[in-house]
Amino acid sequence: QVQLVESGGGSVQAGGSLRLSCAASGYTYSRYCMAWFRQAPGKQREGVANIASDGRSTYAESVKGRFLISRDNAKNTLYLQMNSLKPEDSAMYYCAAEGPGGTWWGCGAGQGAAYGYWGQGTQVTVSS
């Protein structure tokens, strides 16, 4: 059974930083694409960053230069370092892993992947 557990969310002022973590279990983590998505109230869920098994990553335009996605395959853990946070970054952040029947999005330099496994989310609130 695949489990993804996020942590690290919280409340910060604009300009601050947070680091999200996602611990994966029940899954051959190192072989697959991983990603962070977010959803703000009243808005559609959107992809934030993704990373392939080879470490290549892509980002949404809105977070380029501010967020950094990384993975530690030895620890089965995915990270999202978020710097220079803005109020518009406020959302529930979800960790997602490649799996059947999921949301299609990018995966590093490749053609994309279906993200079928999801965590429960961690809230990020940025105040102005």
Image (cartoon, helix red, strand yellow):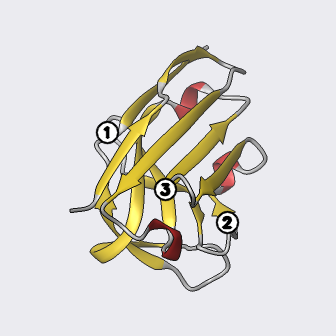
Q: Is 68 rendered above or below residue 7?
A: below
Determine whether, in the image, residue 73 is placed left or right of residue 1. Answer: right
* Mark 2 vs mark 1, CA separation in Å: 28 Å
Q: Amino acid at mark 2?
A: Ser
The disc at residue 116 is: none
Dot 3: element:
loop
Residue 117 in view of the camera: yes
Q: Which quadrant does the N terminus fall into?
A: bottom left
Q: Quadrant of residue 83?
A: top right
Dot 1: element:
loop
Q: Nearer the viewer, residue 31 or 86?
A: 31
Which residue has dot 3 on it? 76
Find the residue positioned furthest to the bottom.
111
Determine whether, in the image, residue 6 is placed left or right of residue 21. Answer: left
Total marks in image: 3
Which residue has dot 2 on it? 57
Q: For the residues carrying marks 3 and 2, which lies nearer the camera in this image? A: 3
Q: Amino acid at mark 1?
A: Gly
Residue 33 spot, x, y in % from top left? 50, 71
Residue at the image point whose x is 36% and y is 51% from the top: 44
* Mark 3 vs mark 2, CA separation in Å: 17 Å
Q: Amino acid at mark 3?
A: Asn
Which residue has dot 1 on it? 42
